[in-house]
Amino acid sequence: MAESCGFVSREWSVGMRLVAEPGVMLLQIQGMPCICCRPLTNHHSLINLLLFKINHMLERFFGRRKKKIEKEPAIFFGRYSDNNKPVEKVNRWTDADNLFKEKKYTESFDAFFEYLRDDSLNNVVHERNESNGRFQFYQGSKIVRGNYDSEHLHVEVTLAKMPSPNIPVMRRLLEMNFNLYYSRYALDGERLCMRFDSDIETANPNKLYYGLKELSTKGDKQDDLLVQDFTSLQTIDTEHIIEIPPEEKEIKFRWLQKWIDEAISYIKTLDADKFSGGIAYLLLALAYRIDYLITPEGKVLHDLEKIVEIYFKKDERQTIEKNRDMLAEFEKLKNRTKDEILATLYRSKHTFAIVSPQNYKAIADSIYNANQNIKWYSDNNYPLIAAQIAEYGIAYCQYSYSLPRPVTEFYHLFMMINHGEYFKELGFNSTYYDPQTRQFDTDKITGRIRQIIDEWKTKYPNLKMKHENIKYDSLGSFNISFTTEVGQLNLDTNR
């Protein structure tokens, strides 16, 4: 190595040294004296060579580290949750309740609809002129419309158009009326609808909330089922639905078929009696995964709900019998025509969650109990069942409860790690785990965890996760350790 004129230097790994003194920085090529030591006659050739080396070095050093910033696709997963309102919104509920007690009914309505509105979705519109007002809000495939004056409140949602009287339709609606607490099915000319009415003096915030929730969630579910079950009915009032791109539908349809095929094929290799518990975990985790990652509506959503109901229905049947029926329903779902399934894939706004919030202990217990059942399958070389049990524990909570947003985001991260190929096909760039090399991107996972915590620290000041407890030696170890940490989150809103 040539001398460097007494400058202090340090080695670079790409064949150069960074030569420095106070106020001066020069790059020196190995095997060549520094610029100040070269004869002046070779100055230009040296500069050219130096520039070439610099460019080569920069390309090698920085090129592989450059991250192309790309916007992730605007694809939504899972069901809407209204359990994530900021403090300001929660305060408006208190305002609505206090104003109603003071008999300031119209002001109470102002506060109530402000509480109900999700500003990120613009899902609720409310207008008032003195004591008269009108409002509308979105719930899936339906628009709920209402109005009120100084004495009465009237709300309705259109379900379908019935051009001619249909006795089977009317019979079904009459039977379903018995299961409603606040609303009722009605016929207005050719229009099938649901209605909810109240005197202003009894329309307190609690009655309004649960009455509107029943009306909108039942209406959103029944409109699709009625039109599909009765060919004489026609779809109506769905212009606000947002169609998703055809390529996204194709990917979701393909993965729906793939997941069902893989589960059924694997289950056929297992002893139905000996592995009845493991098979139940596989089938339920599959239903929850489809619900969250595919997010179908209408008939396919109804199919998934039926599968889950088969298992949890309180009866005397054995698990092996329930598994048989769940498998049969998955076979039916798999055999639905492509057009039937694609018709259930669309986007829409929501105002109410179809499930309710739950004490966090129930979430922690679900995760803990599932993880306790993993050991036997891991020890006896059934890694697929072990992985599905870990997924089941947290997926059950996402499906069954209206979760706090940070928990849903941790669940989403879990799904991106375990089903990365699906997200990749949808156009997502973040790769947290490579199933081929079985390597984790620990920096990226840790960074995402910190990002979630930072985003929700204001509402949940005690929210934290112990990164040192998360294991990365295998996917199975990660799933157990990560979900265990999720189950131990502190979501207390008090400091």
Image (cartoon, grey):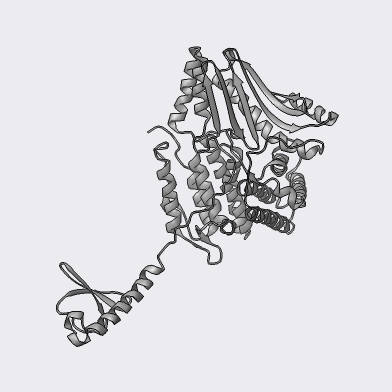
Above or below 33: residue 87: above
* In the image: residue 225, left or right of residue 165: left
Residue appearing at x 50%, y 47% in the figure: 410
Q: State the image coordinates of residue 159 (x, y, percent, origin top left).
A: 71, 32
Question: Residue at the location (61% across, 46% down)?
Answer: 292
Q: x, y (%) of residue 257?
A: 70, 55
Q: Is residue 310 above or below residue 67?
A: above
**Total numbered labels:** 0
> In the rendering, at what x and y percent does residue 486 appear?
49, 45
Residue 184 seen in this snapshot:
yes
Task: Please tell me which residue is depicted at 70% across the width and 52% down the height of the picture.
Answer: 275
Give the quarter of the image for residue 396: top right
Describe residue 494's horizontal placement relative to residue 390 as left or right: left
Q: Position of residue 418 (x, y in %)?
A: 56, 55
Q: Is residue 27 left or right of residue 77?
A: left
| 69 or 211, nearer to the observer | 69
Q: Nearer the viewer, residue 462 or 248?
A: 248
